[in-house]
Amino acid sequence: MSNEQTFIAIKPDGVQRGLIGPIISRFENRGFKLIAMKTCSPSKEHLEKHYQDLAEKPFFKGLVAYMLSGPIVAMVWEGRDVVKTGRKPETDQFQPAILGATNPLNSAPGTIRGDYAIDVGRNVCHGSDSVESAKKEISLWFSPSELLQWKHSQASWIYENA
Ligand code: UDP
Ligand code: MG
């Protein structure tokens, strides 16, 4: 489906390190379409909800503190298979994807985390891990009116059947 959507966020370290442009470029250059974007500083409650599946993990408190440490750039990208192209499925640690693996040291060069990060707790970006979690995350971070439908003038140069 070329209208699949994923939630991608540039974490506080990515923003502070001047990586907004390079991270956006990876998705834009690949041919994906930017549907929504904002710079924001969400509350602790919002971030705990975003990472609620990890609430029992020992790194949870540190993760929330990391996410609260500065502005975040939140985005929705759209395109064919954008969720799994954006990040590796949990079942296949070795499949390269635009983001790379959770631990940057396991991320191939050419991926965002493989090129720009070292520590797992400073891995510069977030990407939804399934179409279902993308839907949940998009509705947590954006209201429907913030999601823009627009025609990509390059669509027929990116998709055979656009
Ligand atoms: N994280 C961490 N220590 C760990 C595992 C994860 O600090 O041992 C952080 C890391 O920033 C990661 C986030 O928690 O991106 C969410 O973890 P998840 O397993 O969902 O990884 P992701 O989906 O971001 O690849
Ligand atoms: Mg995750």
Image (cartoon, rainbow, N blue to C red):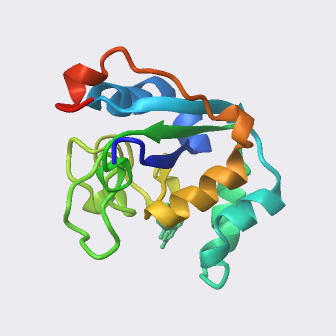
Residue 121 horizontal side relative to residue 162, left or right: right
Determine the residue located farthest toward the top in the rendered image: 153
Numbered-mark total: 0
> Which percent across, then down, holds residue 69?
71, 47
The quarter of the picture where residue 152 lies is top left
Nearest the viewer among 115 and 93 is: 93
Determine the residue located farthest toward the front in the rendered image: 161
The quarter of the image holding the C terminus is top left
Determine the residue positioned at 29% across, 76% down: 91
> Which percent across, then down, holds residue 25?
37, 26
The quarter of the picture where residue 27 lies is top left
> Which percent across, then down, holds residue 117?
39, 47
Position of residue 28 relative to residue 14, above or below, is above
> Which percent across, then down, holds residue 76?
54, 40
Determine the residue located farthest toward the bottom in the rendered image: 56
Residue 79 horizontal side relative to residue 48, left or right: left
Determine the residue positioned at 51% across, 65% down: 132
Determine the residue positioned at 27% across, 31% down: 30
